[in-house]
């Protein structure tokens, strides 16, 4: 069951919700509005470089796009 981040268009509250299936209706826990949008979330990717050193990307990254970002090796 994926955990998604949402923003309510009614009150502006940001919240997380477990979504069991895509057809499940999500409502804001603060104002009960069904007018919510799912936010783009960064995921963490762990692996190894060609030289054997470890790499972790997107750890703590708050950007919604990697365009022009040199903080990590890409997500």
Image (cartoon, helix red, strand yellow):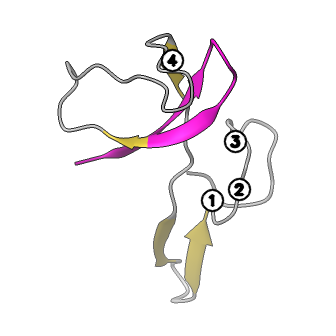
The disc placed on residue 58 is 1
The disc placed on residue 61 is 2
Q: CA distance from mark 1 to mark 2?
A: 5 Å
**Residue where numbered disc 4 is placed:** 36
* Label 2–label 3 contact, CB within 8 A: no
- Pick whichever of labels 4 and 1 is earlier in the sequence: 4
Q: CA distance from mark 4 to mark 3?
A: 25 Å
- Pick whichever of labels 3 and 1 is earlier in the sequence: 1
**Residue where numbered disc 3 is placed:** 66
Q: Secondary structure at mark 3?
A: loop
Q: CA distance from mark 2 to mark 3?
A: 10 Å
- Pick whichever of labels 2 and 4 is earlier in the sequence: 4
Decide which of 6, 53 is in the foreground and name it. Answer: 6
Is 13 placed above or below 58 here?
Answer: above
- Pick whichever of labels 4 and 3 is earlier in the sequence: 4
Q: Position of residue 63 (x, y in %)?
A: 73, 43
Is 33 placed above or below 72 here?
Answer: above
Q: CA distance from mark 3 to mark 1?
A: 9 Å
* Label 1–label 2 contact, CB within 8 A: yes
Callout in the foreground (2, 3)? 2
Q: Position of residue 2 (x, y in %)?
A: 30, 46
Extreme front residue here?
31
Q: Secondary structure at mark 4?
A: strand
Crowd around label 4: few <14 · some 14–19 · many ≥20 (10 Å):
many
- For image coordinates 69% across by 63% down, the residue present is 60
The segment highlighted magenta reads 1-16
Q: Quadrant of residue 27?
A: top left
Callout in the foreground (2, 4)? 4
């Amino acid at each position: 069951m994926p955990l998604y981040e949402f923003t309510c268009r009614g009150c502006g509250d940001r919240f997380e919700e477990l979504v069991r299936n895509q057809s499940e209706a999500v409502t804001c826990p603060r104002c009960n509005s069904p007018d919510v949008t799912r936010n783009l979330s960064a995921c963490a990717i762990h692996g190894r470089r060609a030289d054997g050193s470890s790499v972790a990307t997107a750890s703590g990254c708050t950007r919604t796009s990697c365009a022009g970002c040199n903080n990590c090796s890409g997500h």
